[in-house]
Image (cartoon, rainbow, N blue to C red):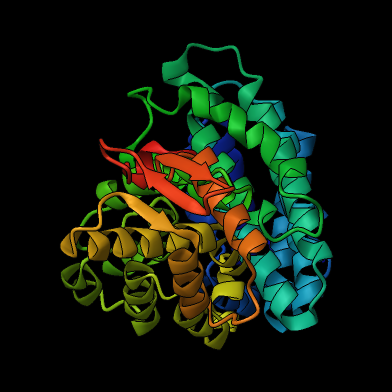
Amino acid sequence: MNVDYNSVASAFTNSAQESFMFSNGEALAKLFVFSDQTLELISSKLQDVSNFDQYTIVMTNATFAQFTETYLQYARDSPAMAEDERHKLLCQVTELYIAVQAGSQGDWLAPVMRPVALALCRSAQRAFMATGDAGVYTQAASLLLRLLIDLLSDGSPMESSKKLGSLFVAALLLRISLRTSAAPGAYASKALEVKRMWDLPVFSRRDRTSYSYWLGRYYLVCYYVESARVQLEYAFGSCPEWHYHNKRAILRYLLVANMIRGRLPTQQLLEKYEMEPVFAHLAYHFRKGNLAGFQRVLADNMEFFRSQGNYLILLERTELLIYRNVILRLSRIQESEGRGRTISYRDVLVAFRLSSQNLEMDVLEMESILSSLISQKFVLGFLFHHQQLVNLSKKQPFPPIMAAHA
């Protein structure tokens, strides 16, 4: 076949070679695209090409030539491929891109790197949806980890360094690591290193917001609730108002982190972002100290919270806080009746049984809960075991949950 037989392949490789020679990343990004609509268009123009190396032979850089050839194969074949096979081929494209980037200096390839990395993440998700094989996430995470290592290894001045793309790739790596069959930390540890550069002014607000969102989700999975809350608060506050759906996505996780730290959402906030009714129901039972009602709502919405990875942490980390609210309500009742700061074990046991709907709870279990509340400083006071009494502190017996250990 003559090298000029397919004008699209010839024009593509010539433009790619010229852009590469002049380190024009913006021009390359216009060539190496990954949207389905564009790929279908390119595919229709390349169906008569069986061998791309006759076009890429003119390229002076062998690694870039191989990357270009593999991308053209992907563009030609991917629209008709099964998702798992398509993902495998995209992984090859990504691997060759990493090799190209490793041989370059500076951040001029960043406009290409971003769509390649993002396409890899989306491809892994589609392949998983089609096959149910979590191995596609592991494969994508391994490639993103290699890409991030190369970015961080650049010793050039920050203003022109490959490190400028590290926050973006680290966010994607955190995103993928949450879905791998391995422990999240197996891939996320390198992404966490980027946090020390997070506040440098060279990074865009978009990259900082995205990184904070995924870092917050990672911390939440690891039960680092306060760290998660701080990151998600920043992401929510930095996300522009017009990105309504993004703010709503962030808020789903921020509400969980805040609830575990004792901060409940207002009805106005829930209505503004049209949050699922379950959050209002959970907040109501949490505030009222109704453990049975809270856990019933959580169980009824188990699939929703499991899909977000928040079910267990909500189940485990809220129980003690709801018992705290039971004691708080009980103390207010006693104060209104003029009975002071001392509460009998009998009254506490009745209240706990009512809250949990566990009529078999005994004094020892109840006392264990009280001991946990006091030791973690959710409640300030003393237990008198022999007298079967709880003596609450004179000054602020119920400090803010945010100030306690959680």
Indicate the position of residue 400 as horizontal and vertical percent values: 31, 44
> In front here: 374 or 270?
374
Q: Is residue 320 above or below residue 187?
A: below
Residue in the image at 53% along x and 63% along y: 319
Number of marks in the rendered image: 0
Q: At which x and y percent is residue 338?
A: 18, 58
Q: Is residue 200 above or below residue 306?
A: above
The structure residue drawn at horizontal position 77% and vertical position 42%, both measured from the top left corner, is: 186
Q: Which of 379 and 207 is in front in this view?
A: 379
Q: Which of 146 and 354 is in front in this view?
A: 354
183 is higher (above) or lower (below) than 315: above
Residue 169: image quadrant is top right
Kindly indicate the quadrant of the structure image that contains residue 248. Answer: bottom left
Left or right, residue 222 beside residue 1: left
The quadrant of the picture occupied by the N terminus is: bottom right
Taking the image as shown, residue 178 lies to the left or right of residue 1, namely left
The answer to whether one can see residue 256 in this image is yes
Please state the horizontal and vertical placement of residue 388, each as a whole percent of the image: 53, 54
Give the x, y percent position of residue 32: 57, 55
Looking at this rendering, what residue extends furthest in the front direction?
A: 387
- Residue 8 vs residue 244, the one in the foreground: 244
Residue at the image point whose x is 30% and y is 49% from the top: 341
Q: Can residue 291 be seen in this view?
A: no
